[in-house]
Amino acid sequence: MEINSYIEKAKKGDQVAFTYLLDHYWNEVYGFMLKRTENETDAEDITIETFSKAFDKLATYNPEFQFNTWLIAIAKNVHIDLLRKKKSTLFVEITDEEDQQAYNIADTSPSAEDELITEQNLSQLLQFIKELKPHYQEVIQLRYFQEMSYQEIAEQLDEPLSNVKIKLLRAKKLLAEIIQNQR
């Protein structure tokens, strides 16, 4: 029942509930995709994309099914899409309207976490950041040191905006764990 209450809160836009669901199911989805892809980077990218799609379509979740089953189904579809994309060399144009819609979704206001990170002792923080995987280091660098918006990061990395948001959320979580373990 507890998971269902988090799902309902997330449907209403509760960020704490989103974070809880991400933390609670990350390892299960990531582990499943790691077995399928046998590649950490692909598994992580697929997991990020899975949560991005799940959170975007959370209103369509049917509580008659287990939430993790729903996530795994999304992950399988993301993996299939990735395989198709790798086989296809077609370039897909996005319209100005679609681009503007994605830009309007970007949240450029600094959160409490943003402010906390900037207040940390810089040299110690940089040491902690160096312990992250390179792609997490990159999004942290772009967001907090170059002060780029989510949209600018998405353009720089040539990734969907939702992936950038999930990567940043995951990077901040891992960074918090590193800092916590050092205390």
Image (spheres, rainbow, N blue to C red):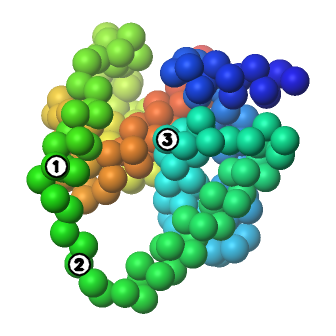
Mark 1 crowd level (few <14, some 14–19, many ≥20, 10 Å Cα): few
Amino acid marked by disc 3: Asp
Tell whether 66 sits left or right of 59.
right
Dot 1 or dot 2: first in sequence order is 2
* Labels in figure, total: 3
- Residue 43 image position (x, y, % from top left): 58, 63
Q: Which residue is mark 1?
A: 97
Specify the quadrant of the image occupied by residue 95: bottom left
Name the foreground residue: 85 vs 119. Answer: 85
Q: Which residue is mark 3?
A: 56
Marks 3 and 2, Cα distance to the nearest angstrom?
24 Å
Residue drawn where x is 32% and y is 12% of the image:
115
Q: Secondary structure at mark 1?
A: helix
Amino acid marked by disc 2: Phe
Q: Which residue is mark 2?
A: 91
Q: Nearer the viewer, mark 1 or mark 2?
A: 1
Name the foreground residue: 159 vs 119. Answer: 159
Tell whether 95 sits left or right of 34.
left
Dot 3 or dot 2: first in sequence order is 3
Mark 2 crowd level (few <14, some 14–19, many ≥20, 10 Å Cα): few
Q: Which mark is residue 125?
A: none
- Residue 174 is at least partly visible in this image: no
Mark 3 crowd level (few <14, some 14–19, many ≥20, 10 Å Cα): few
- Residue 72 image position (x, y, % from top left): 71, 57
Up/down of 35 relative to 28, above or below? below
Residue drawn where x is 54% and y is 61% of the image:
46
Name the foreground residue: 152 vs 76. Answer: 76
Q: Secondary structure at mark 2?
A: loop
